[in-house]
Amino acid sequence: MREDIEFARQVIRLEAMAVAALEALLDERFGRAVELVLGCEGHVIATGMGKSGLIAQKISATLASTGTPSFFLHPAEAIHGDLGRVARKDLVLALSNSGATEEVLRLVPSVKQIGAPLVVLTRSMDSPLARHADCVLPLGALPEACPVGLAPTTSTTAQLALGDALAMAVAKRRRFSREDYALYHPGGELGRSLLRVKELMRDATEVPPARVGITARDALVQAGGLGRRPGALPVVSPDGTLQGLLTDGDVRRLVLKDPGFIGRPIEQVMTRKPLSVRADQLAAEAWRMMKERTFDELPVVDEGGKYLGLLDVQDLLEAGFTSDGG
């Protein structure tokens, strides 16, 4: 067991040293690769065979999720027709530690004929693949951590680190933001945390408000005719400023306390100056307010207090907010 632990430490040391050694290899070639990716008007098409192909898939996914359109192209499939996916406006990012992978090399003549730039991550600047590249990002000579020195280990770790460095440098140049990230990750926690109220609310055409002066009966008739019936009816002044809210809970209480409320003006029975949110507020803030106050609806207003719509708890639940704070 002790021998296993020591060998594992040796593997980790070798891979860490491989990543650290990349720093000294970064020069104007890396800057050139960043410019090529930024200038790409199509897709960054990552390719590689075997373990390098798996790393290429991950790099492509990282690029795509940080604002650079990208997909993976398997080199064996490419030489049997899938090269038709490559266009002049694209950029090909090829990974091959040896720089002599047959399946990848066979792509080069067609890529050159198509006119797409070729960026290569490889061990040596003298490799066959490097000689045909528009830009080479060298990995350096890396001893594999495999007991027999053959299985891709340090080389693929270095490829991944260099690919991440390229993707992150491009994202930084694009000024890629948390909001941009959320756009490409709408199903995740970050995506929910950056949603705005305006993206989930029902606008005034879906939940038209009642006007002050009408009776509670007329207001309830209006509320009952809504398609996606919410549990509250906003009440506004003639200029559209929010004045109050009549909720299902208010109606139930009034039925028990004052059955004659139905004929009274709505402003006499509504909840005045209800809690509201603005359309540009984070939906997560509205969710917190609802949970703290045990509200199911919040009117949405502009900076001047004009009614814009209604946010219902069901809208937040459908967006993935949960009772446990998610």
Image: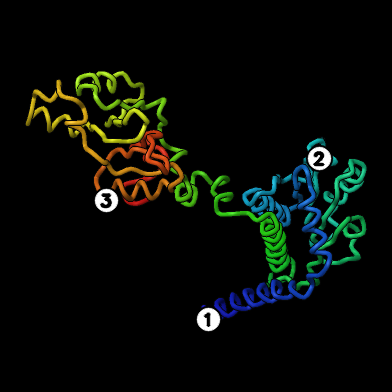
Q: Mark 1 packing: few (<14 Cα in 10 Å), some, or many (20+)?
A: few
Label of residue 2 in the image: 1
Q: Amino acid at mark 1?
A: Arg
Give the Cα separation between the discs numbered 3 and 1. 54 Å
Mark 2 or mark 3, which has the lower sequence index?
A: 2
Give the Cα separation between the discs numbered 2 and 3. 54 Å
Name the spot of residue 324 as percent of width and height, x first.
32, 51
Q: Are marks 2 and 3 in contact (CB under 8 Å)?
A: no
Label of residue 86 in the image: 2
Left or right: residue 3 versus residue 175 is left
Mark 3 or mark 1, which has the lower sequence index?
A: 1
Name the spot of residue 26 as percent of width and height, x first.
78, 70
- Residue nearest the observer in this picture, 177 or 130: 177
Label of residue 292 in the image: 3
Q: Amino acid at mark 3?
A: Glu
**Residue projecting furthest to the front:** 239
In the displayed structure, would residue 86 be above or below residue 255? below
Numbered disc 2: secondary structure:
loop
Front disc: 1 or 2: 2
Which quadrant of the figure has residue 244? Answer: top left
Give the Cα separation between the discs numbered 1 and 2. 51 Å
Q: Mark 2 packing: few (<14 Cα in 10 Å), some, or many (20+)?
A: many
Numbered disc 1: secondary structure:
helix
Colour scheme in the image?
A: rainbow
Mark 1 or mark 2, which has the lower sequence index?
A: 1
Numbered disc 3: secondary structure:
helix
Name the spot of residue 155 as percent of width and height, x first.
73, 66
Identify the residue at horizontal 69%, vertical 63% (top origin).
165
Front disc: 3 or 1: 3
Residue 98 is at least partly visible in this image? no
Name the spot of residue 136 as percent of width and height, x first.
84, 61
Q: Amino acid at mark 2?
A: Val
